[in-house]
Image (cartoon, rainbow, N blue to C red):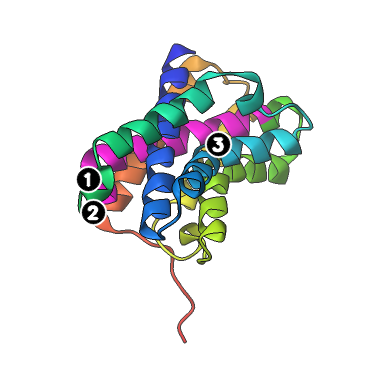
Amino acid sequence: MTLFLAADIIGITAFAVSGFLAGVRHRLDLLGIIIVASLTALGGGIIRDMMLNRTPFAFSEYYPAVTVIVTVTAAVVFRLYQRKELERKWAFVVSDTVGLVAFSITGALLGIRAEFNFFGVIIVSFLTAIGGGVTRDILINQVPSVLTSDFYGTIALIVALLLIVINGLGWMNEVTITAVALFAVALRLVAYVRKWQLPKIPD
């Protein structure tokens, strides 16, 4: 599963940058920035593992924390906070999308392995993917962006649904998981370009 390890690292990096930028914009000190970046990148996985009643992966493996530290250091050295609309650059959007999908798949697979029911698998997948971002927004005292804009959290739900169906049909293997990943990445990028959003209830 080297491909998914790479996707996991890419996702951690993108989410750490997102947390870093949020911390800088809200004028947090260095410790605050590191905390927000870390929770954005690793918070979803920690929440997932607590739900699964196991030691958080970020506490047992070194590469998640090392990835966050290296990312924050590089962001400071290269002054990423001075680059306008960095989060709208294609390199960032693609990296963020890869991370979103990788985290969604990881959460769904662990939920299926734990024999959670339909709703359990969906919730674990969703929280793994967006838990860090929600934690970030709560820390900086704003409504979580995933609840108000973009076709973002929906991707995690779609990934979970597809994997539940595939598992039910007995087709679960690396090929089908990779196919789901590629489909989800493509869907997210198309949604971003076309500015798809879920409908809102009018005032």
Q: Which structural element holds mark 3?
A: helix
Q: Which residue is mark 1?
A: 89
Q: Amino acid at mark 2?
A: Glu
The front one of 175 and 47 is: 47
Q: Label 2, label 1: how many angstroms apart (C-alpha)?
A: 7 Å
Horizontal and vertical percent for residue 143? Answer: 52, 66
* Residue plotted at (36% across, 45% down): 188
Task: Characterize the magenta stretch by its predominant secondary structure.
Answer: helix
The answer to whether the residue labelled 2 contacts the one labelled 3, judged by CB atoms less than 8 Å apart, is no
Tell which residue pokes out farthest to the bottom in this image: 203
Asked whether, in this view, residue 31 is left or right of residue 54, the answer is left
- Residue 88 counted in the magenta span: yes
Q: Residue at x 41, y 63 (%)?
A: 149
Amino acid found under the numbered disc labelled 3: Leu
Highlighted range, magenta: 86-110
Query: Can you see residue 54?
Result: yes
Q: Is residue 177 above or below residue 134?
A: above
Circle 3 Cα neighbour tier, 10 Å, few/some/many (<14 / 14–19 / ≥20):
many
Q: Is residue 85 found left or right of 105 in the rendered image?
A: left
Q: Are marks 2 and 1 in contact (CB under 8 Å)?
A: yes
Answer whether residue 162 is visible to the viewer in this image: no
State the residue position of label 3.
42
Camera-nearest label, 2 or 1 = 2
Q: Is residue 47 left or right of residue 25?
A: right
Quickly name the residue at label 2.
85
Assess disc 1: are there few (<14), some (14-19) or many (≥20) residues with their C-alpha within 10 Å of its C-alpha. few
Per the model, the C-alpha gap separating discs 3 and 1 is: 23 Å
